[in-house]
Amino acid sequence: MTTADAWSTKPATALLVLADGSVIEGEGLGATGEAVGEICFNTAMTGYQEILTDPSYAGQIITFTFPHIGNVGTNDEDIETVNMAAESGIRGCVLNASITDPSNYRASRHLDQWLKARGLIGISGVDTRALTALIREKGVPNGVIAYHPDGQFNLDALKKMAAEWPGLEGMDLAKDVTTTQTHPWDETSWEWDKGYGHTKEAEFNVVALDFGIKRNILRLLTDAGCKVTVLPANATAEDVLAYNPDGVFLSNGPGDPAATGEYAASTIKAVVEKGIPTFGICLGHQMLALALGGKTMKMHQGHHGANHPVHDHTTGKVEITSMNHGFAVDTASLPETVEETHVSLFDGSNCGIRLKGKPVFSVQYHPEASPGPRDSHYLFKRFTDFMRDAKSA
């Protein structure tokens, strides 16, 4: 790709500059300026607002493979970020088609205006299929997304910025998106013509470690009968145990799990050693593996989308899952005490583990969906079953 690869018929007001010096031209939208990050692609056909507010994407520029993004506008209900002060940490988005006017009764704002308000830079008019093919072939590149309405860019400076950005390996981004204060959560799932509700009674007392947690995860825990207390990513084992929890939840989040695990793995290990039922997803899954003696690794292109098939060895079933991760657990590194429970049917990578003989398990994907299929909601019941058994014992 070169500057000649202008995939927009309009004068370029935005650029996507890759670390190898390639330049993709397009039409700018959202906030103006420049932002550097890792460029990934997401194959979901719905839920762009949930994706753009998922803290697991911190440090990344999202390329949407679905061409029509923004056609249902945005609203105040489909935001997944819990820590609004930190926002989601996403660096920008890449679109194929220009954003059309909203066509949905729930829409309250045009996506372009919504991006501006959140400080997110966008570029449209890009051949996202070609960019996706490039990522699949060469792996996720680092890059800079830039938008200047006058079309004036310092190309040399942008190329230098893209080339010198160190990438996500070694980055602890959970600290940037986690809550800064412990807080309770009682909101339940959205219902037609009712919106979100609130629960008053709960069977279980759960502590959720927030590494970049999504709202819908918390809602499904509440739906399952949990009184949830959210703690920051750097909470100690003493902080967690002070709440005398029936169970501990390890949330999703961004960045390199090995970097976050430098302080979080010891907390998780201490909780597990107490015999407390523990459930992790995404980054929480990776850090549980680290706490149990395993290792993680950077993936070639990662998994980002709402159509990823996963085989559950414990049930023999295949479920379609929502995924968003660029690191994975190294199956070969798992000790004898840890069993692999789920595997990706795309590339055979690890998607789930459990500690043998203990109520401790985790999955790589997002069972809460939002967006995505609901095949994996059973995992929340598995968690509550473990807690119920532990309480009765």
Image (cartoon, grey):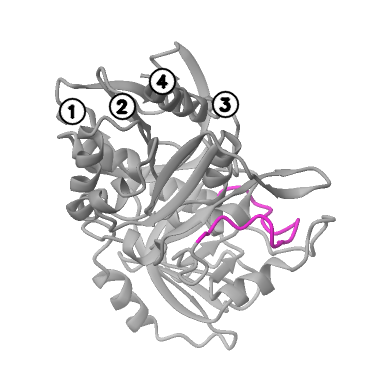
* Badge number at residue 375: 3
The residues bearing labels 2 and 3 have C-alpha atoms spaced at a distance of 18 Å
Q: Which residue is mark 4?
A: 392
Foreground residue among 126 and 173: 173
What amino acid is labelled 4 in the image? Answer: Ser
Horizontal side of 300 relative to 383 (left or right) equals left
Q: Is residue 93 above or below residue 227?
A: below
Query: Residue, x 51% and y 43% (percent of image)?
Result: 227
- Which image quarter: residue 389? top left
4 vs 3, front mark: 4
Q: Which residue is mark 2?
A: 353
What amino acid is labelled 3 in the image? Answer: Asp
Q: Going from the N terminus, do you reach mark 4 or mark 1 first?
A: 1
Foreground residue among 381 and 63: 381
Q: Are marks 2 and 3 in contact (CB under 8 Å)?
A: no
Residues in magenta, as a range: 65-82
* Main SS, magenta residues: loop
The residues bearing labels 1 and 3 have C-alpha atoms spaced at a distance of 26 Å
Q: Going from the N terminus, do you reach mark 2 or mark 4 first?
A: 2
Query: Residue, x 40% and y 86% (percent of image)?
Result: 154
Q: Going from the N terminus, do you reach mark 4 or mark 3 first?
A: 3
Secondary structure of the residue carrying numbered label 3: loop
Secondary structure of the residue carrying numbered label 1: loop
Q: Are marks 2 and 1 in contact (CB under 8 Å)?
A: yes
Q: How many marks?
A: 4
Q: Going from the N terminus, do you reach mark 2 or mark 1 first?
A: 1
In x, y percent, where is residue 357? 26, 17
Q: Going from the N terminus, do you reach mark 1 or mark 3 first?
A: 1
Near mark 3 (Cα within 10 A), the count class, few <14, some 14-19 or many ≥20, is: some
What amino acid is labelled 1 in the image? Answer: Leu
- Which image quarter: residue 341? top left
Kindly tell me whether residue 369 is visible in this rendering.
no
